[in-house]
Amino acid sequence: NYIYNKMRNSYKVSSYLKCLKDDGIILNNIYLESNNDYSCSIDELVITNGGIFAIKTLNYAYDDYTEFNIPKVLSLNNSKYKDDTVVDLSSINSISEECLKCYTILQDILSCDIPITNIIAIPQENCVVKEDYSLETPIVTAKDLPYYIKNKINIWKKVKEIKELLNLEFDIK
């Protein structure tokens, strides 16, 4: 069951990312090692001219990463969600820690000023993650990954353009 869920979830994430093939290179199942005995695996690595996105997929069976002590009917913003699954934060935190390792290794490998973004992808649309302010890694549903990545690329391009304009302005004076 675990292997089936992992394959299905990986397929779901990679199929949504296919629409980004014109924007960059998409690599699957990458294993990285550093000289400091750190290692990590990245489920999807999206390399674009606007940055690099290291994606870890929540690949656990539902029973392994959901909380059972939360009522089935949640009240969020006065709306009722009966079919949502609440994801256990300890699982998310462990994946986030793995993402930070990947980030460090990628920075060591690249050693340049390319923006790197870690993302935790949740293949199931009906998952709810309780807000945790200590979490640094964005959590995005598989369906929203292309939009999230394209938005980030556009933001980075705008920031780069503004920096170039500011540099030109300061060079002239």
Image (cartoon, grey):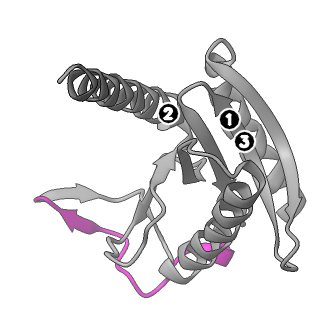
Percent position of residue 136, x then y: 44, 67
Quadrant, the N terminus? bottom right
Q: Residue at x 34, y 24 (%)?
A: 164
Measure the C-alpha gap from mark 2 to mark 3: 12 Å
Q: In what element is the residue under mark 2? A: helix
Residue 59: image x %, image y %? 72, 60
Residue farthest toward the left in the current orientation of the protein: 78
Q: Which residues are magenta?
A: 63-77
Q: Residues within 10 Å of mark 1 (few under 14, many from 20)?
A: many
> Looking at the rendering, which quadrant does residue 106 occupy?
bottom right
Percent x, y for residue 129?
41, 66
Q: Amino acid at mark 2?
A: Ile
Under mark 1, the amino acid is Val
Residue 76 colored in magenta in the image: yes
* Front-lying residue, 4 or 34: 34
Find disc 3 in the rendering and name its residue.
45
Amino acid identity at mark 3: Leu
Q: Is residue 112 above or below residue 171?
A: below
Residues at circles 3 and 1 in contact by the CB criterion of under 8 Å: yes
89 on left or right of 98: left
Residue receiving disc 1: 46
